[in-house]
Amino acid sequence: MREIYFNKALNEALREKMSEDESVLLIGEDIGVYGGAFKVTEGLLESFGEKRVIETPISENSFMGVATGLAMMGFKPVVEIMFMDFIALAFDQILNHTTKFHYMYNGQVNIPMVIRTPAGAKGGYGPSHSQSLEALFIGIPGLKVVAPSDPYTAKGLLKSAINDPNPVLFVENKVLYGTKGEVPEESYLIPLNQAMIRREGTDLTIISYSRMLQLSLKVASFLEKQGVTLEVLDLISLSPLDEEAIIASIKKTKRVVVVDEGCKTGGIGAEISALLAEEAIEYLDAPIIRVGLPNVPIPASIFLERHVIPDEQKILDAVDQCLNW
Amino acid sequence: MTTKIGEQKLLEIFGKMTLIRSFEQKINWLFSKGMIGGTSHLYIGQEAVAVGVCHVLRDDDYVLSTHRGHGHLLAKGGDPKKLMAELMGKKSGYCGGKGGTQHLCAKDINFLGTNGLTAGAIPIATGVALAIKLSNSNNLVVSFFGDGASNHGNFHESLNMASIWKLPIIFLCENNLYAMSLPVSKSTSIMDIYLRAASYSMKGLPCDGMDVFSVISTVEEAVRWVRAGNGPCLVEAKTYRFCGHSKSDQLKYRTREEENAWKKRDPIKLLKMHMLDSKIEPSVLETIEEEQMNLVEEAVKYAQDDDPPVARVASSGVFLNA
C-alpha cells in the first residue's frame, strides 16, 4: 500500500469532504496560498476558492465565533488554530458559546464544527508554541476531543469529525506531521469514540495517544526482546473516554502506565487514573503510574526541552517501576 | 419628532414599546417576590431602540442580542408567554428552562440568542452575516451590544472582519452611558462610539435612542446601505437604562438628577405626546396600554400554570446524536 505523510493524510481528508459536501468550509490564519503553518491545507484554496477557504485576520476569538455563526446557519466549518497555544485566545467562544448552544438552546441549533490544531513540542519551539493542552478541554460538556497517532487514523478520524453534528476538537501533533504511514486510496472512516489496541500484551498496559503512543510502541518493541509483552492502547478519543476498552485491557494485564505530553497535574493521565480508581481498582496489582510533563513551562533550548518532555527512557522507567512494584 | 409612519403602524410601535415596559416591570415585581431566580437585566428606558430597529427589519432578518435582551426578543416578535415561562424555568419556555434570561434563542423568528458574555454575540452575528453572504441571500443581521462591549476585542475584531468581507450586518450599539457602573467617560477613549466605524472604513451613524422616529430613520438609512451590498454599518443609539444594571445595583455611581433628566425624555412618553399631538384619541392609547398589560398577565398565568421540566432534561441534549 502507498505511504503518505500525516499532514498529507489530513489534507486528503479535507479535500474529500470539501468535494463531497459544499457546506464544508475552512477558516483560519494563513490557510490559503501559504497552505497553513504545517501545510495541512496546501492546494485547497486553488481547488475550492476563497468562498470555501476563508483566511482570517489574527482574531482567534472572533473567527471562532464567526465559525460558530456559520455552523448555526448550516455550514460545517473546519477551523484551524495555528498552534494549540493560541487556542487560549478563542477559549471564551469555545467554552461559553460553541459547545453550549445545542444544550442551552434546547436543541434549536447544533454546531457541526471541527477545530483542528497542532500541539506538542518539536525541538525548540519554546513555552508558547509547544504545549499539549487537551486536558483543559476534556471537561467541557458538549465538546468531543480526539487525537490521532498515525496517518491512517488521522485521515479517517478527521472525516468522521467533519461528519459529526457536534463540535469536535481535533488535536494534531507537530512531530507526527512529518511521519509516514500506509493510507489506502479508498474512502474509509475511523469512529470518533473508540480506543484501539495497537499492540497486544499481557504484562502491562500502556495507555497513550498521539505522538506519545508512537514512543510507547517503541518501548513495547524493545521490551518484547526481553520477554516482556506490553499492551498498548491508543485512546484516540480523549473525550469521551472509551471506558470499556480501557477497563477491559486493565482486567487483562492488571498493571497500567498512562503516557501523555501534557502537564501531569489535572492531565489526561489524572483523569484515567481517577476512572480506574473508581471503576477498576480491584483488578490492579500495582499503582497506576503517570508519565507526563512536570508542572513547568516548556523551555526553548533543546538541551532543556528534552528533560521535561516524556521520551522512551522515561516511559521505560515508569514501566519498570510498575512491573517491579 | 416628525414621521411619515401611518397611524396603524404608530399604534403597533406604541403597543410593542408598552408591552416591553409592562413585561419588564412585571419581571421586576416577580423577582422581588422571589418568583424568578438568577439575575435579570431590565430594558426599561431603552424600548425605542429595540422596537425602532425591529420595525425596520424584515421578518427573515436575524437579530443577536445581549444580556439585556428581553426587549430585543419581544420587539422581534417573540411570544411573551414562552419568554415568561423560560424566565420562570418552566418546560414551555423558549429553551425548556435550560437557557434563562441570558441564553434565550427563538430560531423560529430568526432570533439567534441573548448572550451572557459582554460582546460575546458580536462575532457569532458576524458569522451569521458571512453565511448570508455565502448563500447569496439578501437578508441581514443586527448585532445589539452596549457601550461596554465596544471596548472588547470581539467588537474590534468583528468590525474589522465584517468590513474586509463587506458583510450584511448592522452593529447596533446601545450606549446607555454605563458599563455596569463604569461611565463611558472613564472606560472609553471616545464619547461618540459610532465614530469608531471610521477605523474600519465603515459607515457610522448616531441616533437619539429615546426617540423612536430617530431610531427608525437612522436604521432605515443603515438598512438601505447594507442591503445595497455596501457592507456593514455601525449605528449608535444614545439611550439610558432607567433601572440598575441588574438586581444588586444600588446606583451609587450616578446621580438622581441625571436619572430624572433622562426620565423626562422617557421614550414611551415622548411617543405618546407625539401621538396625542397628532390627534390620536387618548382612549385609543389607554386601550392599547391595557391590552399589553393583559398580555403580560396572561404570560404570567401561562408560565405559572406550566409544568417544570422533568429531571432527565437536565442531563440530556448535550450532544446531537448523529
Image (cartoon, coloured by chain):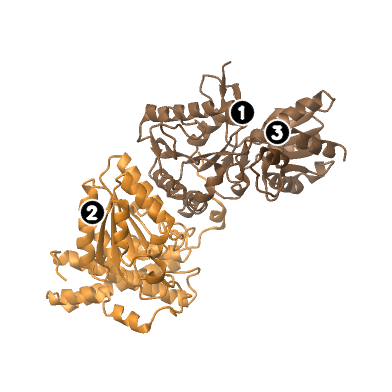
Chain colours: A brown, B orange
Looking at the picture, which amino acid does disc 3 mark?
Answer: Leu
Distance CA(mark 2)–CA(mark 1): 51 Å
Query: Marks 1 and 3, Cα distance to the nearest angstrom?
Result: 14 Å
Q: Mark 1 or 3 closer to N-term?
A: 1
Q: Is residue A7 above or below residue A102?
A: above
Q: Is residue A282 visible?
A: yes
Disc 1 with disc 3 on a shared chain: yes
- At horizontal 20% and vertical 56% (from top left) the residue drawn is B221
Quarter of the image for residue A303 reads top right
Where's residue B262, x and y in %?
A: 30, 78
Separation of marks 3 and 2 at Cα, in angstroms: 58 Å
Q: Which residue is mark 1?
A: A150
Q: Chain of mark 1?
A: A
Give the letter of the chain under mark 2: B
Give the amino acid type for the residue marked by disc 2 in the picture.
Val
The residue carrying mark 3 is A233
Question: Quick one: A316 or B25, which is closer to the camera?
Answer: A316
Q: Chain of mark 3?
A: A
Residue B74 seen in the current view: no
Drawn side of residue A286 relative to residue B149, left or right: right
Q: Position of residue A64 (x, y in %)?
A: 45, 46
Report whether A205 appears left or right of B200. right
In percent of width and height, residue B18 lies at 28, 71
Dot 2 corresponds to which residue?
Answer: B223
Work out which quarter of the rendered image holds the N terminus of chain A and state it.
top right
Q: Quadrant of residue A304?
A: top right
